[in-house]
């Protein structure tokens, strides 16, 4: 393809490049210019938002869990990620080293897709952002920046670096490839992205066949490792479903025997006044007492401990029951 063809193809994708560029640059703008969302001690800390990705991340869950379990490493990762988003988004918007920045957009979008593609209470929000970012990165890589880009401006000014062969792969202008090779790359890339679209849509939401599901609609809490030992009830809670902007609010905890008799209970008032020593959090998103309940943010995991009266009949089976303010209940057998 000649230079004129690439000039027009890049020009036709200008709106896509500008919007995608702003999408990533605005993350930097929001977190550091409009507000400071990189302060771990303030509400809205981006690390807690990142913790929300954990429950159903695809393929990168161990990385997320490691970071949210190590606050200092998480902070450095969030700072680095924010700076990269700012640089990539701004240069992509300007069309400077457009193809190199498009690789950055592709990578950032791919990470968002794998990490948070399951989130979104109404329109599969994060999945759409991720998969469209992947498609935009690939498209702009093939087209280059076009007429309204800094790359083209420097080409017209005959800047020495634009005549380097590598600039064609990193900036704009005709790719130094034969037409049939370019056609195969476009087809292969498009097939891959379409396959990724269908796979992730099905994996996260059942959007291709079967029953649709949205794990962001209502809260769910997983209970594990529940036991009574030395007159102490201990169990681990993990909030693994529900909206990322809204917690699960526990208003009741009960332990029942086989006949349904309650042998231990914590009501709404008691849960709102738990001592910090009774809660051992694993991640940066923390289970904590609120004004009227025990609050479980999305992605939070904690071990809770309660003093309990001695169990007289240790041969009987007991059940732990958690009650959410919505009326939802979650249960698990208690080991003695």
Image (cartoon, rainbow, N blue to C red):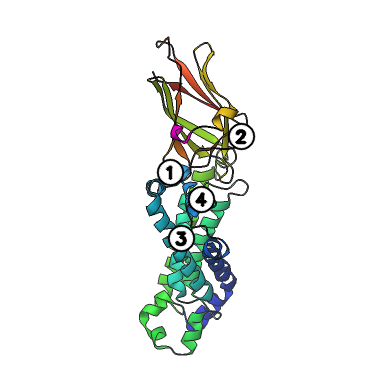
Q: Are discs 2 and 1 less than 8 Å apart at CB? A: no
Give the foreground label among 4 and 3.
4
Residue at screen point 43% across, 21% down:
334
The circle on residue 108 is 3
Q: Are discs 1 and 4 less than 8 Å apart at CB? A: no
- Asked if residue 146 is positioned above or below residue 19 in the image, the reply reads below
Whichever of labels 3 and 2 marks the residue nearer the N terminus, that label is 3
The circle on residue 156 is none
Helix, strand or loop at label 2? It is loop
Measuring from the top left, give residue 302's x and y in whole percent.
44, 36
Q: For the residues marked 3 and 2, what is the alpha-carbon distance in whole angstroms?
A: 39 Å
Question: Alpha-carbon neighbours of circle 3 within 10 Å: few (<14), some, or many (≥20)?
Answer: many
Whichever of labels 1 and 4 marks the residue nearer the N terminus, that label is 4
Q: For the residues marked 2 and 1, what is the alpha-carbon distance in whole angstroms?
A: 23 Å
Whichever of labels 2 and 4 marks the residue nearer the N terminus, that label is 4
Q: Which residue is mark 2?
A: 292
Q: Which residue is mark 1?
A: 283
Measuring from the top left, give residue 116's x and y in whole percent.
50, 50
Whichever of labels 3 and 1 marks the residue nearer the N terminus, that label is 3
Q: Which residue is mark 4?
A: 49
Q: Nearer the viewer, residue 26 or 276?
A: 276
Q: Is residue 276 magenta?
A: yes
Residue at screen point 56% across, 61% down:
35
Measuring from the top left, give residue 234's x and y in whole percent.
42, 26
């Amino acid at each position: 393809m000649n230079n004129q063809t690439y000039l027009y193809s890049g020009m036709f994708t200008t709106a896509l490049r500008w919007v995608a560029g702003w999408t990533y640059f605005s993350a930097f703008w929001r977190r550091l210019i409009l507000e400071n969302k990189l302060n771990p001690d303030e509400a809205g800390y981006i690390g807690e938002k990142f913790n929300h990705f954990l429950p159903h991340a695809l393929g990168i869950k161990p990385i997320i869990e490691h970071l949210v379990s190590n606050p200092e490493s998480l902070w450095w990762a969030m700072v680095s990620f924010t700076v990269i988003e700012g640089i990539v988004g701004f240069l992509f918007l300007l069309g400077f080293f457009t193809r190199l920045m498009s690789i950055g957009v592709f990578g950032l979008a791919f990470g968002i897709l794998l990490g948070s593609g399951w989130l979104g209470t109404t329109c599969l929000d994060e999945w759409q952002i991720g998969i469209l970012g992947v498609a935009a990165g690939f498209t702009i890589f093939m087209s280059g920046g076009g007429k309204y880009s800094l790359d083209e401006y420097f080409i017209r000014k005959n800047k020495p670096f634009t005549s380097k062969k590598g600039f064609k792969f990193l900036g704009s202008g005709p790719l130094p490839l034969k037409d049939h090779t370019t056609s195969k790359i476009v087809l292969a890339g498009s097939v891959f992205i379409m396959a990724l679209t269908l796979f992730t849509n099905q994996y996260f939401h059942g959007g291709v066949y079967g029953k649709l599901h949205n794990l962001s609609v209502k809260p769910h809490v997983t209970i594990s490792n529940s036991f009574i030992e030395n007159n102490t009830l201990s169990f681990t809670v993990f909030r693994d479903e529900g909206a990322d902007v809204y917690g699960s609010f526990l208003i009741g905890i009960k332990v029942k025997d086989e006949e349904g008799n309650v042998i231990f209970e914590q009501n709404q008032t008691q849960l709102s006044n738990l001592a910090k020593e009774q809660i051992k959090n694993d991640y940066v998103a923390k289970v904590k007492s609120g004004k009227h309940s025990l609050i479980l943010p999305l992605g939070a995991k904690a071990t809770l401990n309660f003093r309990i009266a001695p169990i007289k009949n240790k041969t009987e089976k007991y059940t732990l029951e958690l009650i959410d303010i919505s009326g939802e209940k979650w249960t698990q057998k208690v080991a003695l």
